[in-house]
Amino acid sequence: MKNIFNGLVVVCLVSLWISPVQAVIIKIATLSPDGTYWMQKMREGAREVAELTDRRVRFKFYPGGVMGDDKAVIRKIRIGQLQGGAVVAGSLSQIFPDIQIYSIPMIFRSLEEVDHVRASIDPLLHDGLNRQRFVVLGIAGGGFAYIMSTKPVRTLNDLHKQKVWVPDNDPMAITVVKNFGVTPIPLSLADVRTGLQTGLIDTIAAPLIGAIQMQWHTQLQYLTDFPLMYIYALLAVDQKIFKRIASEDQKIVYQVMGRVFKDIEAKNRQDNLDGLTVLRNQGIQFLTPSSAALSGWQSASQKTSQLLIRDGKLSHSMVDLLKQHLAEYRTP
């Protein structure tokens, strides 16, 4: 009997020793269509993570909006149906308002200014979402959003006559458009093309690559040629699932997916440049506002940033910090 008992103990110990560690599977949803560069790079990163962690960490993707829009994705993360999302920053604004700090209208003059500011503020955004139980694995700029429309828009008065779309989960965008003297029409990203086709909306603001990827540009005739605001997206996962990953594997996930999103951002920048040619070849007319008209846009934008602070959509301290870094960059 003693020998049998000892034998069972040995078998149990051997079984425990050879049992594979249960994999952590992170389900990620996004509106980005399958086959796009975003999806290609995220899948490449997922394969590398699985290989480097001996499949202890794996990603499963749900592209093309099959899990709903960004608002639905965040809700499903909260209830545990998903573990993460590659979403636009605005979709997390109700959880952490300052996540939209870079989208203050007309705050930046160039991408070089964006890079300078992000070097200092990106870590603060990571920390802010971490306090709200999200882990940020990467941030990728989508580029500057431009006003695109079916009728010419050069001045604020022109905009007042338009039916302007805003993302339905983006309180900051709603505030911006209202302060420009327009009643916005909120729609999910998935409904924008249909809205343009039916005439429900006739004006959008989006980065060139977004408008082209989502085929919105096929319904538009004009582009107002100044950057309205900087748009960016991020890969965020539920803190609970991330804590189940061993610390050494966490480092691998951070390293690989962080690099993936840097690659995505670099490609986005090139695609936005190429997008200028695509839109011109499509026959879209580029409209340059006069100096007086541009001054009107800038004045309205400055008032908007004050309203965003007043309404609690951005913190005073974060706005001041951004302006401080901009001043440093602009000082000769």
Image (tube, helix red, strand yellow):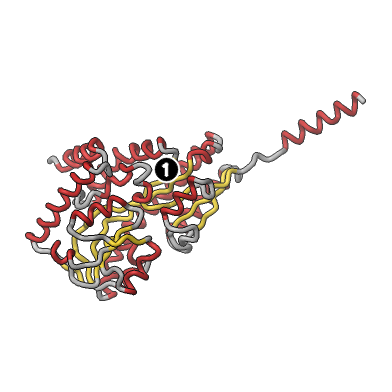
Using the image, determine if residue 273 lies above or below residue 117.
below
Q: Position of residue 68 (x, y in %)?
A: 46, 58
Q: Residue furthest right?
A: 1
Residue 212 falls in image quadrant: bottom left
Q: In the rendered image, which quarter contains the C terminus?
A: top left
Q: Position of residue 250 (x, y in %)?
A: 51, 38
- Image point (26%, 58%), residue name: 145
Tell me if mark 1 has few (under 14), some (14-19) or many (20+) residues whose alpha carbon lies within 10 angstroms of its own: many
- Image point (33%, 58%), residue name: 167
Q: Label 1 amino acid? A: Val
Using the image, determine if residue 102 lies above or below residue 124.
below
Q: Position of residue 50 (x, y in %)?
A: 57, 47
Locate residue 180 relative to residue 68 in the image: left or right.
Answer: left
- Kind of element beneath mark 1: strand
Residue that numbered label 1 is attached to: 136
Q: In the rendered image, which quarter contains the N terminus?
A: top right
- Image point (76%, 31%), residue name: 13
Q: Position of residue 53 (x, y in %)?
A: 57, 42
Residue 249 falls in image quadrant: top right
Using the image, determine if residue 86 lies above or below residue 253.
below
